[in-house]
Amino acid sequence: MDKRGFTLIEVLISIAIMATIAAIGYKTIDSMIKIEHNLKDTDKILNQLQKAFSQWQIDCANIEQHEIPNLIHNFKVMNYASEKPQSLWLIRRNSDTETKQSLWQLIIYNKSQSDIVDNNKYEWQRIAVEPTDNSNTLLKQISDIDNMLKSDEIQKINLLPIQNFNVKIWQELKWQKYSQLNNQLPIRGIQLNIELADEWRNNLGKKQIFNCITKIN
């Protein structure tokens, strides 16, 4: 029986083969882990988008389109400013859960500077003022909004990291820019377009702008 052992070349070849297999295996496992993390991040982003759009649709579907007593004439129930800071104001109908009393609530959607120390990062922020059944109180809230924003009396929620957002209005059987809004006619639909921040767009591939259309009865 031949008891000759392995030669040095055979050992080195075996080590090289095992090292190659291990490297391939590591890259495969590492790629699978990255794919799994990316899928989780994408799911998180889509869930957050869904929640933000759901809140937006609820607000828009309940927008007040009837005349509000004593409300200043140049304030529309929906106001959009495309210049900096981008903001959209709307007055929505609300109701007290206990008394079922009809209430008005001022809602503001802002393109707000992110808390992160980076001048290029913005959040799509929702601000909700305390509902009221008194038009004079509503008028006071609108007039004093700058001071209210500095206090803790109103609810502020950062919904999404964004670059920009804009709205279009469905009136007279066509979509038109907010600047063309006729306050004498009812709003039948609102289209929201949101351009996401770069860190989110990387997870969603080429998808950069999301839109949400709300039908208003």
Image (cartoon, grey):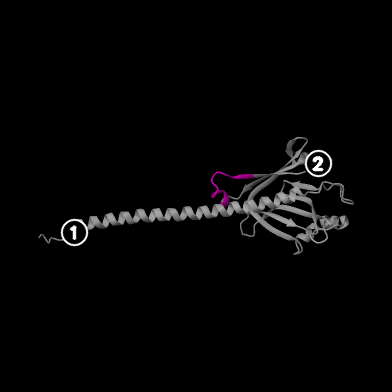
Image coordinates of residue 59 in percent, x first then y, are: 74, 51
Q: Nearer the viewer, residue 138 or 117?
A: 138
Residue situated in front as seen by the camera: 112 or 192: 192
- Name the residue type under label 1: Leu
- Which residue carries the number 2 mark? 186
* Quadrant position of the C terminus in the picture: top right
Q: Amino acid at mark 2?
A: Pro
Residue 198 among magenta residues: no
Is any part of residue 173 visible from this angle? yes
Q: Residue at x 47, y 52 (%)?
A: 35
- Which stretch appears magenta? 199-210
Q: Which residue is mark 1?
A: 8
Residue at x-position 76% and y-position 60%: 149
Vertical arrangement, residue 167 with respect to residue 16, above or below: above
Where is residue 69 drawn, in percent x and y?
89, 51
Q: Is residue 120 visible?
A: no
Q: Quadrant of residue 118?
A: bottom right
